[in-house]
């Protein structure tokens, strides 16, 4: 029918769910909350809007004072300081998620020095937090307060209590419309599905934004419609209902 199906994720290109590779009609992917767009089969980056290198190094230095887990997404891969590898086991994640993190990170001696000495721009930062004995995320509020005082970055949560940082104005919604321009698709020809806070801009930007049934309330409130949950094939249900396919 000439419809492009485009996965959009907060993950780096190297962290895309492996089953996407088995879907022959996926031609493009949005990664890092829209900070980088790729031709899926060739792995070619066709658009990128990273945090500049000097600012990236500065952020790592400042954030390191909070004793939190820091991942920097660079050229489609997630990078992490070797000293922080052990922190993955302390995160309140499933074993599958911890395994994913361990196996997809590029470990460097010191993330700050790596970015600074190589003048590296960062597509996105992901910050994760350890819980205390009462289940409260340690240093999350302090980190959020610090980040919200910065006027050159955008900060959202992609779930599991994390915080995700991109260049100001860069989000899934803006990049979805940018890709629409490249493909000749108008805003009202774009349908988007999402479930978490980092999907909000995409839901609002698309001509037809649909929240999954298991979405956060903020996403449901922003959407044109709500479909079934991901466990109930919600995207398929919406496509049948609204596109009559």
Image (tube, grey):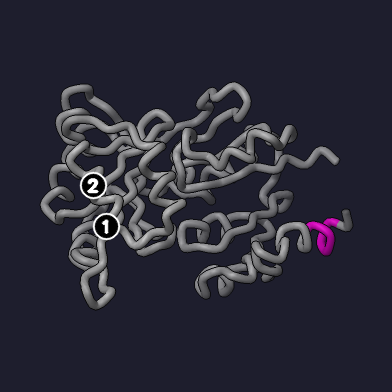
| Element class at badge 2 | helix
How many neighbours does mark 1 have within 10 angstroms: few (below 14), some (14-19), or many (20 or more)? few
- Callout 1 secondary element: helix
Label 2 neighbour load within 10 Å: few <14, some 14-19, many 20+: few
Question: Which residue does the image show at 43% across and 61% down from the upper left?
Answer: 159
Viewer-nearest residue: 70 or 55: 70
Per the model, the C-alpha gap separating discs 1 and 2 is: 7 Å
Q: Residue at x 16, y 33 (%)?
A: 110
**Residue 245 rendering spot, x and y as whole percentages:** 88, 53
Q: How many marks?
A: 2
Q: Is residue 108 above or below residue 118?
A: below
Residue 129 picture quarter: bottom left
> Which circle marks residue 90 in the picture?
1
Q: Residue at x 53, y 39 (%)?
A: 16
Q: Main secondary structure of the magenta part?
A: helix
Which residues, given as a range, are shown in magenta? 239-243
The stretch drawn in magenta includes residue 209: no
Q: Which of the image's four quarters has the N terminus? A: top right
| In this picture, residue 141 sits left or right of residue 40 | left
Evaluate if marks 1 and 2 touch, with contact meaning CB atoms under 8 Å apart.
yes
Q: Which residue is mark 2?
A: 86
Image x and y of residue 126, in percent: 33, 49
Image location of residue 32, percent across then percent down: 44, 43
Displayed quadrant of residue 109:
top left
Residue 241 colored in magenta in the image:
yes
The percent coordinates of residue 46 (x first, y second) are: 53, 27
């Amino acid at each position: 029918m000439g419809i492009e199906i485009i996965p959009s994720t907060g993950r780096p290109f190297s962290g895309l769910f492996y089953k996407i590779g088995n879907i022959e009609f996926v031609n493009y992917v949005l990664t890092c909350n829209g900070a980088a767009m790729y031709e899926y089969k060739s792995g070619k980056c066709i658009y990128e809007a990273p945090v500049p290198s000097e600012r990236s190094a500065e952020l790592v230095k400042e954030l390191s004072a909070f004793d939190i887990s820091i991942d920097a997404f660079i050229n489609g891969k997630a990078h992490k300081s070797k000293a922080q590898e052990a922190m993955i086991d302390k995160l309140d994640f499933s074993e599958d998620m911890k395994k994913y993190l361990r196996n997809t990170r590029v470990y460097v001696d010191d993330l700050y020095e790596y970015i600074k000495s190589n003048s590296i721009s960062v597509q996105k930062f992901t910050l994760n937090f350890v819980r205390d004995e009462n289940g409260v995320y340690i240093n999350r509020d302090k980190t959020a307060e610090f980040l919200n005082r910065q006027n050159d970055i955008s900060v959202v949560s992609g779930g599991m209590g994390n915080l995700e940082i991109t260049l100001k104005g860069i989000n899934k919604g803006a990049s979805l419309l940018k890709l629409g321009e490249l493909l000749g698709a108008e805003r009202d020809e774009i349908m988007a599905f999402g479930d978490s806070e980092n999907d909000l801009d995409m839901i609002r930007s698309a001509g037809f934004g649909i929240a999954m049934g298991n979405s956060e309330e903020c996403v449901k409130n922003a959407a044109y419609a709500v479909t079934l949950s991901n466990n109930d094939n919600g995207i398929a249900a919406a496509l049948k209902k609204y596109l009559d396919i």
